[in-house]
Amino acid sequence: MEHLGIIGTGNMGGALAMGAGDLAEVTLYGFDPSSKRLESLRAACGLIPCAHPQEVCQRSTYVLLAVKPHLVPVVLADMREHLGPDICLISIAAGVTMDRLKELTDHVCPVIRVMPNTPALVGQGVFAVCLEDEGLTEANKTFVMNLLGHMGSAYELEERLFDVFTGLVGSGPAYVFHFMEGLIDAGVSLGLGRQQATDMVKGLVTGSATMAATSEMHITQLKEMVTSPGGTTIAGLNELEKRACKHALYKAVKAAHDRSRELG
């Protein structure tokens, strides 16, 4: 039985608690300034509320830090004397590097840095996981990868690639929603009701993503399945090519990557 403590049970911390609560081999503890959130998670997934972060450390073998980045130094200062080599610290704080986490903990415990994206809120997250701390055991690595894999897809990634992950996958849901919004507006412009167009586009994206996830065919082959010579789809794709749609996507990812690097 592993003991997982979560400090900060807002949207992402709460979602991760709900996901971990499904695992029979995990006992959950948590701290949050909002007792209402803690009681809600106690009822929903069996999380045991703690009175302060120090208590979470005392009762846990893994501590998941799910607070805003600017709060990380304050929270870790309060926790530091309760950390040690037998506690693995997991941080999802954006922009707080491994070096910074090690500095803030005085190098007393192994550290794992994780970057999630918002579909983790519905159990379909994509997680980048940095396992470069030499103090980590194989058991630490296996537990965290299995934990996050239970809530979506977890990828071990060198920290130097986290800015790329942020630009592509961390920011990615917004690109998808922006694309969906454009399709919905196009449908409305051409005569569909907005709710009808919205429901249709949701189905379109869900179905297409499921095909991509389950098919052995390459993404390009799936596209070609829809693209008959001289047909409607190639006419639409040609318009996207004229407007350099793929290049615009690259520029969006590159801009988000660059901004992530600037911030942290």
Image (cartoon, rainbow, N blue to C red):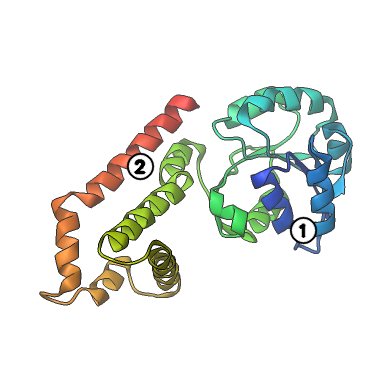
Toward the left, the furthest residue is 230
Label 2 CA crowd tier, 10 Å (few <14, some 14–19, many 20+): many
Residue 203 position, x and y percent, is 43, 70
Q: Tell me if residue 43 comes above or below residue 37 in the rendering.
A: below
Q: Is residue 233 left or right of residue 128?
A: left
Q: At 76% from the left edge and 29% from the top edge, which residue is drawn?
A: 108
**What is the quadrant of the N terminus in the image?**
bottom right
Residue 21 appears in the figure: yes
Residue 50 on image: x %, y %: 88, 40
Name the residue rendered at 81%, 44% in the picture: 36
Q: Dividing the picture into quarters, in which one does residue 21 lie?
A: bottom right
User: x and y percent of residue 143 in the render?
Assistant: 70, 54
User: Mark 2 or mark 1, which has the lower sequence index?
Assistant: 1
Counting the numbered discs, the total is 2
Q: Is residue 138 visible in the rendered structure shown here?
A: no
Please tell me in which quadrant of the rendered image residue 181 appears.
bottom left
* As drawn, 239 above or below 213: above
Disc 2 and disc 1: Cα gap in Å? 34 Å
Of residues 89 and 190, the one drawn nearer to the viewer in this rendering? 190
Q: Which residue does the numbered mark 1 point to in the structure image?
A: 21
Report x, y in % for residue 30: 81, 43
The amino acid marked with disc number 1 is Gly
Please state if 51 lies on the left or on the right of 263 as rendered. right
Instruction: Give the answer, above or below, for where 100 lies relative to 140.
Output: above
Name the mark on residue 155. none
Q: Secondary structure at mark 2?
A: helix
Please state which of residues 110 and 214 is positioned toward the viewer in this rendering.
214
Residue nearer the viewer, 32 or 257: 32
- Residue where numbered disc 2 is placed: 253
Local crowd at mark 1 within 10 Å, few (<14), some, or many (≥20)? Answer: many
